[in-house]
Amino acid sequence: MNSMYFTEEHQMFRQSLQDFLQKEVVPHIEKWEETGHIERFIWKKFGEMGFFGIAYPEQYGGMDLDLFYTVILLEELQKINSGGFAAAIWAHVYLAMTHVNKEGSHELKEKYLTPSITGDKIGCLCITEPFGGSDVAGMRTTAVKEGDTYVINGSKTFITNGVYSDYLVVAAKTNPELGNKGISIFMIDRETPGVSATKLDKLGWRASDTGEIAFDNVVIPASNLMGEENKGFPYIMQHFSLERLIMGINAHARAEHALEYTLKYMSEREAFGKSIDRFQALRHRIADRYTEMEICKEFNYSVAKRLNDGQYVVKEATMSKLQSTKMADEVIYDCLQFLGGYGYMEEYPLARMLRDSRLGPIGGGTSEILREIIAKMVIDKKDYKPAT
């Protein structure tokens, strides 16, 4: 492991996490993949182990550790071969909880962040809409101020943890005529009247619940506004850096896992009197793919270091997601090919890896959108600034 970024304490954490996942998670993965429902007991166990609190303030039950503990958590979640389970965990910890921690009032943090850290509450982040996709500024969900309340109407889609979560962090327009300058962020409790969710059937990420959510005259206290009114878009953009880096790290980790599995298989599979890792055509393609994976991994670590140091890495994180997810798809496609007919069988891990990996270039901003963002920064000299 790269000692430039990981200390002995990091390595001890990685080992304890590996042991926990093998003992507590892996035995249930096949059931959760079939049912699309991750049982509540595992959330509580994650909370008891402190895994939900590694990046959060001690004041609310967290440990306030450096970002490389998060890198380790993300990497190890990719190695149990359930993109859906991994997504459910990191969407709770680093999408929903990030907004609660950064924009929530002390009262909202006590009510939602603290039980999120202990595993007693599960959160989801609701930004994408049926008609908007990657066009965040084009959202139609509205929040109208009425006295000391807001009334929310609209819908969201492709929301990870959208069905079984306990609370929703929701972006809505408080001033529609201002476009992206009129968006605000709200906390909505699942039990609030007018909130409904429909579960979506997906190609991959089968263990996670992905929902389409409707808000029909949902009335919430004005105190459930998170941060300042009409500042939601900058908040969202600021946190996209972390989300995109997370998806980049996920990508290099699943590619590495696929390569390690495939190399073991190739060393044991024989054809024409020798193991298939002796054939030059396969050896050289492995060499290319391993090189691409290592380059992405090293880049992602360097971006994580800069983010941990407080730098605004929107360009680099966007590049991380763009390149790493492309690389992972290509690596896993080849790894499946190296297994021949067995790669196409559900009892072997590559079939699920291929399905799960395909979400990488789509979720959290499509590769096409990311290329335009990078083009604006590189060609047009667009300079994005942090909201806070």
Image (cartoon, grey):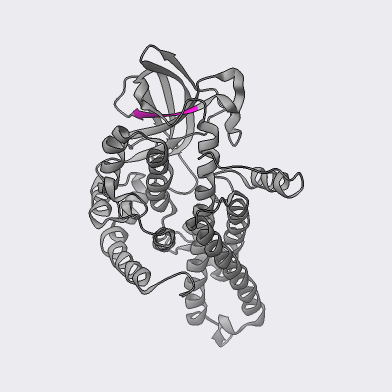
Query: Can you give x and y, in whole percent of width and height, for residue 250 in the image?
Result: 49, 57
Query: Can you give x and y, in whole percent of width and height, for residue 158 in the image?
Result: 48, 37
**Residue 244 shown in magenta:** no
Q: Main secondary structure of the magenta part?
A: strand
Q: Which range is magenta? A: 184-188
**Which image quadrant is residue 82 in?**
bottom left
Height in image: 206 above or below 262?
above
Query: Can you give x and y, in whole percent of width and height, for residue 91 in the image?
Result: 42, 45
Query: Can you give x and y, in whole percent of width and height, for residue 315 in the image?
Result: 63, 51
**Residue 187 shown in magenta:** yes
- The answer to whether residue 140 is left or right of residue 282 is left
Which sits in the foreground, 87 or 2?
2
Residue at 36% in and 74% down? 8
**Which image quadrant is residue 376 in?**
top right
**Which image quadrant is residue 386 in?**
top right
- The answer to whether residue 318 is left or right of residue 72 is right
Regarding residue 39, the answer to whether it shows in the image is no
Height in image: 310 above or below 224?
below
Which sits in the foreground, 388 or 159?
388
Tell which residue pokes out farthest to the bottom in this image.
273
Tell which residue pokes out farthest to the right in this image.
379
Height in image: 115 above or below 265?
above
Which sits in the foreground, 222 or 37?
222
